[in-house]
Image (cartoon, coloured by chain):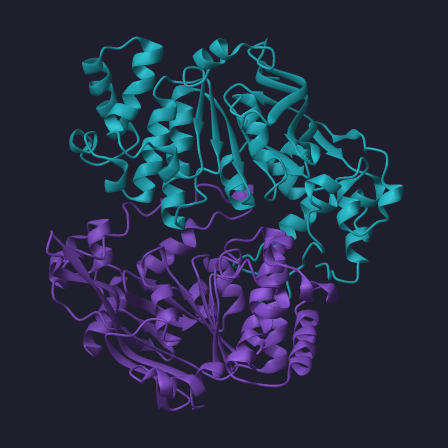
Chain colours: A cyan, B purple
């Protein structure tokens, strides 16, 4: 087995609000092996972005807090690391690609200056060296005419180009770990395909590991080696990509896979759905949260389901109801294929 | 042939571009450039394309939120493209619209009851009690709890808000609904719930839909026929089965290829389409698609008419040598 670059153990991240403490991430554990791409998939509010921001400690302050667990990056616990320490890790060892390429870039600086920033800071380049390196980087992310583009401002670029610039910034210092938080959600499909290809290519070239966060199982299937499925702040299933798609165990994973219209699903047929919606974070139960969605009496949901190794490297955190297919199919709102 | 409920002919929607301190008009953005299609009663026409291709502009022109530059919009035989607002009002109940962002298209200060009843109020239909009664029935039909009527939009999730938007569009019993990206902002599990609801409502009420979206898999699922747009023009139009099985235009093929299949065994099947959609302010002189892929035949297309041609019965495609297979191009060339 390959060595792990990042190990997350029992991470709990919460937000201090007026209504009390909200645990957005509630005891998750997963590893990122060297050179691999791990995908985190889940619906909005499941805690996938909070997980990513916990790793680089960019949680909204002062509300966001890591309440427990360990984040071991090359054996060093980032939870205990000082802010100065984190600053030298971010950008240099861990690069982050954010979702919205417009807001991730500073509108009043040229893109060349924004790429240079981390090179000057982490690599000690002079301004001139950094400028030339920026042009090289723009070339590598396949921006046409990089010598001119380097002096342009973000508003002069299209959405796809801006995302390429964000990638160039994240990869400027050859980080060992790349965290991409919904890198293609704001983009059109043809551009999405270009960006995913580019990311994969650069990752292989540099031999880095990556975490790809998305709500799109299609993107996961195309790009990742391992998958973590999150639901309501917990991991419900994790497995190698092939195994997860061919042999999903948790009712939620199955439901997600079935509810995507595919090009070959019968025309105008009813799609299988997952009934209900995710409970608001303030109402999360201690027990199985998917049963909560399925309308199971809340009083009975008191014990957090255990993480079971279903098959080698294939883990599920589910109660018995969630692993038996009958639960979903017998539900009145669902017609299972 | 069945008379279409909606027939759009040579629709053009140009926006002026102004620049300089005097804000003089310096050009046009041809958001929609000579587009024609029709929708039959009870049918769904899907309209797909990437952002900025003009699909939403078409939707807004049909409900006359925008005044088209030229062209005809025949609804039930009457041309509403240039109809003055006063005459348009009695037509409005028949064409309704559902918007993309369910959070922004609902008034935050109105209760759900007020939002859904507003169309009735505007058209002076029923007494307050009758209106409330009808709203209750509608909310129940779209799958919302009965106590929703006195709540406010912020109390609902994205999927529920979209159901409210659908209920509002149904209030006046329309025959045509323009659905502008109705599920793009929703999570997958909720997306399928809303798609199912739309299919059920269509069946029950014999609705016609114009379904605008960028996701070809979703569009293909819900539509009878699909029109693919690129930079203000329709490049291909056919029934949804043919579009998926036998696409003719290279852009349609590229869109289909670009969809990430939720199946890891189907990786790396194709090369993605290079480049970006060109700017509509300064579009290429010839085939916009040929320009994007740098096709050798691009120079031939400068100034050529790209109005779609019926290559096979019911299958229309733009006569573009940069985008068609040589056989299809020969066939189309004879028809011009």
Residue A292 rendering spot, x and y as whole percentages = 78, 46
Is A308 placed above or below A261 here? above
Instruction: Tell me if A145 is positioned left or right of A99 in this view.
Output: left
Give the tally of numbered discs. 0
Q: Is residue B7 left or right of residue B115?
A: left
- Residue at horizontal 51%, vertical 45%? B266
- Horizontal arrangement in the rendering, residue A150 relative to residue A115 (left or right): left
Report the front residue among A293 and B166.
B166
Residue A304 vs residue A37, the one in the foreground:
A304
Visible residue check, residue A298: yes
Question: Could you tell whether B53 is left or right of B185 in the image?
Answer: left
Q: A271 and B173: which one is in front?
A: B173
* In the depicted structure, whether residue B262 falls above or below residue B86: above
Q: Quadrant of residue A249?
A: top right
Quarter of the image for residue B251 reads bottom left
Q: Quadrant of the C terminus of chain B?
A: bottom left
> Residue A337, how many percent across, how many down?
70, 59
**Picture residue at 57% right of the left edge, 20% below the top:** A33
> At x 49% / y 84%, what residue is drawn?
B41
The answer to whether one can see residue A269 in this image is: no
Q: Give percent across and percent down for residue A7.
A: 62, 18
Asked whether B3 or A82 is in front, the reply is A82
Picture quarter with the N terminus of chain B: bottom left
Residue B114 at x, y = what percent? Answer: 60, 69
Q: Quadrant of residue B156?
A: bottom right
């Amino acid at each position: 087995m390959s060595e792990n670059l990042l190990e997350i153990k029992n991470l709990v991240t919460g937000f201090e609000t007026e209504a009390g403490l909200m645990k957005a991430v509630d005891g998750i554990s997963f590893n990122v092996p060297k050179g691999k791409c791990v995908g985190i998939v889940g619906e909005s509010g499941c805690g996938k972005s909070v997980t990513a921001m916990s790793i680089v400690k960019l949680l909204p302050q002062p509300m966001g807090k890591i309440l427990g667990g360990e984040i071991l990056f090359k054996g060093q616990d980032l939870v205990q690391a000082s802010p100065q320490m984190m600053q030298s890790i971010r950008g240099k060892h861990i690069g982050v690609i954010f979702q919205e390429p417009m807001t991730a870039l500073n509108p009043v600086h040229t893109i060349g200056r924004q790429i240079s920033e981390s090179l000057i800071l982490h690599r000690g380049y002079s301004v001139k060296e950094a400028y030339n390196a920026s042009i090289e980087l723009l070339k590598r992310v396949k921006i046409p005419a990089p010598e001119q583009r380097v002096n342009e401002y973000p508003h002069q670029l299209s959405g796809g180009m801006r995302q390429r610039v964000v990638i160039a910034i994240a990869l400027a210092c050859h980080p060992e770990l790349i965290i991409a938080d919904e890198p293609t959600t704001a983009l059109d499909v043809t551009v999405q395909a270009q960006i995913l290809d580019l990311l994969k290519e650069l990752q292989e070239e540099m031999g880095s590991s990556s975490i790809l966060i998305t709500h799109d199982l299609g993107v996961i299937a195309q790009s990742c080696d391992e998958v973590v499925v999150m639901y309501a702040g917990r991991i419900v299933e994790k497995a190698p990509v092939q195994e997860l798609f061919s042999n999903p165990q948790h009712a939620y994973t199955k439901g997600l896979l079935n509810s995507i219209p595919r090009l070959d699903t019968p025309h105008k047929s009813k799609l299988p759905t997952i009934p209900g919606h995710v409970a608001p974070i303030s109402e999360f139960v201690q027990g199985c949260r998917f049963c909560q969605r399925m309308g199971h009496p809340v009083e009975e949901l008191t014990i957090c389901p255990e993480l079971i190794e279903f098959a080698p490297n294939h883990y599920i955190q589910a109660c018995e109801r969630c692993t038996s297919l009958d639960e979903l199919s017998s539900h009145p709102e669902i017609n299972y294929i | 042939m069945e008379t279409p409920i909606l027939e759009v002919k040579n629709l053009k929607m140009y926006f002026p571009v102004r620049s300089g301190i005097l804000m003089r008009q310096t050009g046009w953005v041809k958001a929609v450039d000579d587009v024609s299609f029709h929708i039959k009663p009870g049918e769904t026409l899907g309209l797909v394309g990437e952002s900025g291709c003009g699909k939403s502009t078409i939707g807004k022109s049909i409900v006359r939120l925008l005044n088209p530059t030229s062209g005809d919009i025949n609804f039930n035989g009457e041309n509403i493209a240039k109809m003055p607002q006063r005459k348009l009002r009695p037509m409005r109940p028949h064409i309704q619209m559902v918007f993309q962002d369910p959070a922004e298209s609902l008034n935050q200060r109105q209760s759900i009851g007020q939002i859904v009843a507003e169309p009735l109020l505007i058209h002076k239909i029923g007494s307050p009690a009758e209106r409330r009664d009808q709203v209750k029935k509608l909310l129940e039909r779209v799958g919302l709890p009965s106590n929703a009527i006195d709540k406010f939009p912020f109390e609902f999730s994205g999927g529920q808000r979209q159901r409210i938007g659908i209920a509002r569009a149904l209030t006046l019993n329309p025959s045509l609904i323009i659905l502008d990206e109705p599920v793009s902002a929703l999570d997958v599990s909720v997306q399928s719930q809303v798609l199912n609801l739309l299919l059920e409502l269509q069946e029950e009420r014999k609705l016609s839909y114009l379904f605008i979206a960028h996701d070809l898999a979703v569009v293909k699922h819900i539509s009878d026929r699909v029109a693919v747009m690129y930079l203000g023009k329709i490049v291909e139009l056919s029934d949804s089965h043919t579009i998926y099985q036998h696409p003719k235009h290279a852009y349609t093929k590229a869109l289909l290829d670009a969809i990430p299949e939720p199946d890891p065994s189907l990786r790396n099947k194709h090369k993605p389409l290079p480049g970006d959609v060109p700017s509509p302010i300064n579009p290429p002189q010839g085939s916009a698609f040929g320009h994007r892929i740098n096709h050798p035949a691009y120079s031939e297309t400068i100034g050529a008419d790209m109005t779609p041609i019926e290559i096979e019965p019911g299958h229309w495609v733009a006569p573009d040598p940069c985008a068609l297979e040589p056989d299809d191009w020969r066939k189309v060339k004879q028809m011009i």
